[in-house]
Amino acid sequence: MSAISRDDVAHLASLARIELTEQELNDYAGQLDVILTAVASISEVAADDIPPTTHAVPVVNVFRDDVVTPSLDRDSVLDHAPAAEDGRFRVPRILDEE
Amino acid sequence: MSAPLIDFDEVIANFDPVLGLEVHVELGTASKMFCGCATEFGAEPNTQVCPTCLGLPGSLPVVNGTAVESAIRIGLALNCSIASWCRFARKNYFYPDMPKNFQTSQYDEPICFEGYLDVDVETDEGTRTFRVEIERAHMEEDTGKSLHVGGSTGRIHGADFSLVDYNRAGIPLIEIVTKPLEGAGKYAPEVAKAYVGALRDLLRGLGVSDVKMEQGSLRCDVNLSLRTSPDAPLGTRTETKNVNSLRSVERAIRYEMQRQAALLTDGTAIIQETRHWHEDTGVTTSGRVKSDAEDYRYFPEPDLVPVAPSAEWIEQLRSQLPEPPAERSKRLREEWGISEKEMQSVINAGALDLVLATIAEGADPAASRKWWLGELARRANDEGVELESLAITAKQVADLEGLVQSGRLNDKLARQVIDGVLAGEGEPAAVADSRGLQIVSDDSALLEAITAAIEADPDAAQKIRDGKVAATGALVGSVMKATKGQADAARVRELVLQELGQ
Amino acid sequence: MSDLIHASAVELAAQIANKTVSAIEVTQAHLDRIAEVDGRVNAFLHVDADGALEQARAVDHAVASGQALSPLAGVPLALKDVLTQTGVPTTAGSKILEGWRPPYDATVVERLRDAGVVILGKTNMDEFAMGSSTENSAYGPTHNPWDLERIPGGSSGGSAAAVSAYEAPLAIGTDTGGSIRQPAAVTGIVGAKPTYGAVSRYGLVAFSSSLDQAGPFARTVVDTALLHSVIAGHDPRDSTSIKEPVPDVVGAAKSADVSNMRIGVVRELSGEGYQPGVQARFDEAVELLRAQGAEIVEISCPSFTYALGAYYLIAPSECSSNLARFDAMRFGLRTDDNGELSAEDVMRHTRAAGFGPEVKRRIILGTYALSSGYYDAYYGQAQKVRTLITRDFEAAWASVDVLISPTTPTEPFRIGERVNDPVAMYKADLCTLPSSLYGGPAISVPIGLGDENLPVGLQVMAPVMADDQVYRVAGAVEKALAQQWGGLLLDQAVAL
């Protein structure tokens, strides 16, 4: 388990789309290091042959029938959008291509 | 923007292409993958949305069982193994048309894996079968659609802002990924096209999707790299997106091969990037560079439980699969008494289902093939659309053929009726009525035109009287012209000969 | 102070049903109490007086027309602001959702409405339920009614404080790593985390999907069980919702019979780091249970030691993904959209302005734990530890019916005391994390006051879908202590 640098935090913040100040970058680098040290004990557990648990109660095949149910009223959705136009959500210009 | 290209033959002489195809199919389910919103194409923007497909806080997904069934059926038809236990995973990345900023997809546990699809391609040595190996087919959800407003091009670059419609967000998708396809050599573009075409026929046969490429319900991304020889290590690949017709699959690959070869010949390295295919200009342009920073942070979707199809369920679905397209085509070839090559041209034109539907509506096989591969194929080509997108149905073609059989129309008049049907003037019979199209069967009217034709061309008339029957053509032609094509040419010929004592 | 605010939910429902008092009067009494004390407690983010009175009126109408009533009809409730409710804002304690009014009701809210429960308003919480003190709310901390300088626990601190301050007899909280049980313990009330999947998560603003679970708060065990039975049950809109019928928690709470039960004391949840007063009250509670005929066994659960590590990898990982949707595009806050900045930059700026420090910290931590190259070492390993913890529980069930421990290692700390020490803060959840990771039910019930004269809770943990067992034990403890104290622990609090 490696130490987290300021640059690591900057990279993570970019993946997570959060603008962090220089102060925050440094603070989080230190704090994450402390947290990771505190949680590092889990790596001591030899668990190669242990299956992971992703759900508390194991259930499989929960499906719904292919039936159309009512959608939301468009106005009720767009009224709470930061910006809307022509029945659509208006968003700032998109730089990245998908 | 067009890049330097080198001649295709030269590409083949110096390079070996390796292909990979990723096809996204929108399933034709009534409701979305994880919620009950309708999936209808072309609805008013943001009228088919709910908390779940809008990714509103607190909303949760529930899997559409029919979508899972469709995925399994597709896998079985592609000769895949079906996972006895698999999960959905979250693919995390931010994009404004993706409501949750993660796509619910499958990662290392696809529902279908390790299959193949055999496709036939015409080569210099005759028809050759290429086996396209399928790596996986997995379930995921579609994104919304952005409209880029302002700027000069209307494209994403230079836009002032964008307007997003989430109706498409959450529509079930199956992504079918091939293994790297090697050894196709100069036939690589044709093999890719044949694969996508065969896949389309197979999916249509399964009834799981309307597979309309121009509406985006079947979308193809093409991975391509070149290497100097089949023994050389794989080259750097590009991923060309937005290849949305069968013809484009072939053209885009051909273009990318020529572009990459020109760069490599010049000693320039290929950049690993996404490229965009432009149907209008026939080129690909550079998109996003695939950087190492891309990190989707996949993890099992905690809001969903695993999918574990029982062996019984899988076998039941297998037993209900329709006849595979390849076997069906063999059977039909025998029934219709046509050659493999003729059959292939029906399939390549994307006409098989249309011909079958036309036969089902009462037309005979030969006539059905004639219309779809002849006149209608020409119209589709003129309009630059797929055959199936023409505004004429199999029933209308069958009706048209019925009018010809009954003697009301000849082929020339029938073509005019097609004009009318395509122009939205109604059913064939109604078009014929409203346009006044009808073979002139009244002999007296024809005789009047024949007399006029004889008077206008006494030389030809004399030749016929003298026994030179070949000269009949000229007179028949002018009668047909005079009757604006509404006469039965055979009957005109009979009457001309009779009139001139032959 | 009106007697109506001190009455239990059972008493209020009975009085409303037999027309001794109207639901309107009960609701108004609580609204008055909120007006009187909430300036000091800050339990509520939004009080919906009109909506509450309207719901109360409907109940009175039903009473008048002789309709059959649910057992909690007309009883007021405080709802944690992490559940969607139409007509009022849902903020999840965050600036990024300021002013957002969801277009749909959470399943829990639907069930409460159907049961005639009167929702007074939305309660304060740690932002997106991330915290153990309610100090991480963007809307200021909630104060512990026992000592306004102290934290009320978290993240459901507003709900716990509302019940403890007699602003509501019932409240809904959510528990991801202890966020119901820990606040219940430090405010001297009862709080239960049902089996994961017993209560629908539909409409619960997700923090950590595989752990989040809504549950009830009340001042008595029976009230808590009644609320549990109202909100639990299968919901087809939540794929992880359990189909099996809800155990008879009300019957178990009423029986309060532990004779012949085998109760395990978890060895790992004691010792260093546990305040002497907490340990002393716990030991007395164990003796109380033994005196009522329970067989007490010490049980070792070695993997519990790793619960903190596993939890602080799993929960941040899931939250980093769950909170990605707060991107300024479709709902909620949008900042710096000046026509110049791109969508990508507006997302960055809005998330920087809209999320508090703890939320950012956990998103960054979770992004790290899921990133390529680290997944196996962190998230993957944490899920395996979860399996080991589950195995410890299952091994325990071979010899005991329930496990018990203190709910928290310490009494509530002072507001501001641990804000700059995340790890110290995280340790408040040390005892509650194992059953969160396992998914079984757990409850906290008051067992007295510690060294600083502040409440101490007993945690009871049971097998998955044996929710009735935790109510049975909690009921027995409550009954025995009520005999000693002549009432509830809360009666010993200084009146606000």
Image: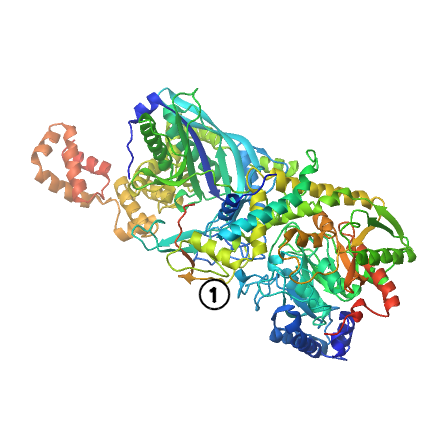
Q: Position of residue B287 (x, y in %)?
A: 38, 41
Kindly identify which residue carries mark 1.
A79
Which is more toward the observer, B380 or B167?
A: B167
Tell which subunit mark 1 falls on: A
- For residue C192, above or below residue B336: below
Which is more toward the observer, C100 or C275?
A: C275
Identify the image quadrant of residue A44: top right
Identify the image quadrant of residue C383: top right
Sort mark 1 into few (<14), some (14-19) or many (20+) by Cα contacts within 10 Å: few
Q: Position of residue C252 (x, y in %)?
A: 82, 59
C67 relative to B485 in the view: left or right: right
Q: Residue at x 53, y 37 (%)?
A: B137
Amino acid type of the residue that numbered disc 1 sits on in the rendered structure: Asp
B2 relative to C253 in the view: left or right: left
Q: Position of residue B39 (x, y in %)?
A: 49, 52
- For residue B466, above or below residue C81: above
